[in-house]
Amino acid sequence: MASNRIVCRECHRVNDPDNETCDACNSSSLTEDWAGYVVIAHPEESEIATEMQVTEPGAYALKVR
């Protein structure tokens, strides 16, 4: 599961634990302190993606601290 993953504080994208920067936005502001998990396959058709301002498919955290 994703519990051992890290999340970008900027774009909320879930990344592998060995990453030093975000795969999506290249930010180095990563954290292990997050909650909730959503996989967005078709952001152009998703109300959640619109609310989260997500434009790329992928796994995202719902809450990042």
Image (cartoon, rainbow, N blue to C red):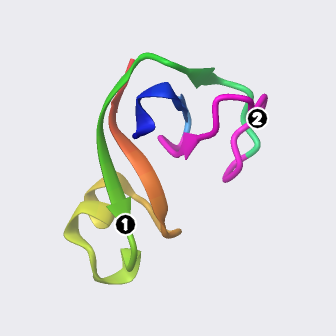
Q: Who's the residue at 45% across and 54% down the image?
A: 59
Q: How many marks?
A: 2
Q: Who's the residue at 26% across and 74% down the image?
A: 46
Q: Which residues are magenta?
A: 11-25
Q: Which residue is mark 1?
A: 40
**Which amino acid, mark 1?**
Ile
Q: Using the image, tell me which numbered label, if any, was put on residue 61.
A: none
Relative vertical location of residue 51 with respect to residue 50 in this rendering, above or below: above
Which image quadrant: the N terminus?
top left
Residue 56 drawn at (x, y percent):
53, 68
Crowd band around label 2 with a 10 angstrom C-alpha radius: few (<14), some (14–19), many (20+): some
Where, by quadrant of the figure, is residue 53 drawn?
Answer: bottom left
Q: Main secondary structure of the magenta part?
A: loop
Q: In front: 53, or 59? A: 59
**Which amino acid, mark 2?**
Thr
Crowd band around label 1 with a 10 angstrom C-alpha radius: few (<14), some (14–19), many (20+): some
Q: Who's the residue at 29% across and 83% down the image?
A: 45
Q: Say left or right for 32 vs 43.
A: right
Residue 42 drawn at (x, y percent):
38, 80
Residue 8 drawn at (x, y percent):
57, 34
How far apart are the two marked residues, 1 and 2, measured between alpha carbons? Answer: 21 Å
* Secondary structure found at label 1: strand
Relative vertical location of residue 64 with respect to residue 62 in this rendering, above or below: above
* Secondary structure found at label 2: loop
Q: Say left or right for 23 vs 53.
A: right
Q: Which residue is mark 2?
A: 21
Q: Are marks 1 and 2 in contact (CB under 8 Å)?
A: no
Is 19 colored magenta in this rendering? yes
Q: Say left or right for 12 vs 34.
A: right
Q: Who's the residue at 39% across and 17% down the image?
A: 65
